Image: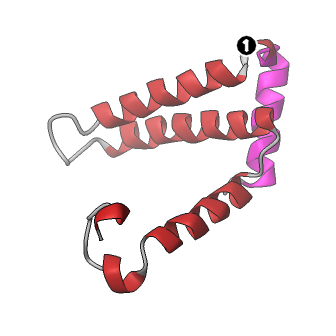
């Protein structure tokens, strides 16, 4: 999901500023929610959002997700693949294709 070079750049950025002391799991989770709300705000009145703002806010969300995964010792690639396997089982192609119905109503 996130390359080693991105992880290293984030780690260096945080270390240079001595910010890891503020990066508790709860603070990082809050920051994800805040940045996700800012991303959503880009689409508040129109689906034609400003691409520059979307890129910036999406980068913030991914940054905080990466930092939280690192803080918790989680491998982002693995947790996404694990969740995809669970979701694949909940939404079999033959029942879910072309539908947005929740899994328990398929």
Identify the residue at image location x=26%, y=77%.
98
Q: Which secondary structure type mostly characterizes the magenta part of the structure?
A: helix
Location of residue 41 (image quadrant): top left
Image point (58%, 42%), residue name: 62
Image check: 6 left or right of 65? right
Q: Look at the image and name its color scheme.
A: secondary structure
Verify whether residue 31 appears in magenta.
no
With 14 as the anchor, is 1 left or right in this view?
left
Q: Residues within 10 Å of mark 1 (few under 14, many from 20)?
A: few
SS assignment at label 1: helix
Magenta-colored span: 3-20
In the picture, the quarter occupied by the C terminus is: bottom left
Q: Quadrant of residue 59?
A: top right
Residue 76 falls left or right of residue 87: right
Instruction: Name the residue carrying label 1.
Output: 22
Q: Position of residue 35 (x, y in %)?
A: 47, 29
The quarter in which the N terminus is drawn is bottom right
The residue located at (79%, 50%) in the rendering is 5
Q: Is residue 72 above or below residue 14?
A: below
Residue in the image at 73% along x and 19% along y: 24
Query: Compared to 71, does 75 lie above or below?
Result: below
User: Residue 87's x, y, as percent?
Assistant: 50, 65
- 79, above or below 20, in the image: below
Instruction: Farthest residue to the front: give it.
Output: 104
């Amino acid at each position: 999901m996130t390359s080693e070079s991105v992880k290293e750049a984030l780690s260096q950025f945080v270390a240079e500023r001595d910010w890891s002391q503020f990066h508790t799991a709860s603070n990082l989770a809050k920051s994800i929610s805040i940045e996700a709300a800012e991303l959503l705000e880009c689409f508040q009145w129109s689906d034609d959002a400003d691409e520059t703002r979307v890129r910036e806010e999406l980068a913030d969300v991914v940054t905080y997700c990466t930092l939280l995964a690192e803080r918790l010792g989680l491998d982002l690639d693995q947790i996404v693949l694990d969740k995809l396997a669970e979701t694949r089982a909940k939404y079999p192609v033959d029942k879910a294709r072309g539908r947005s119905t929740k899994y328990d109503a398929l």
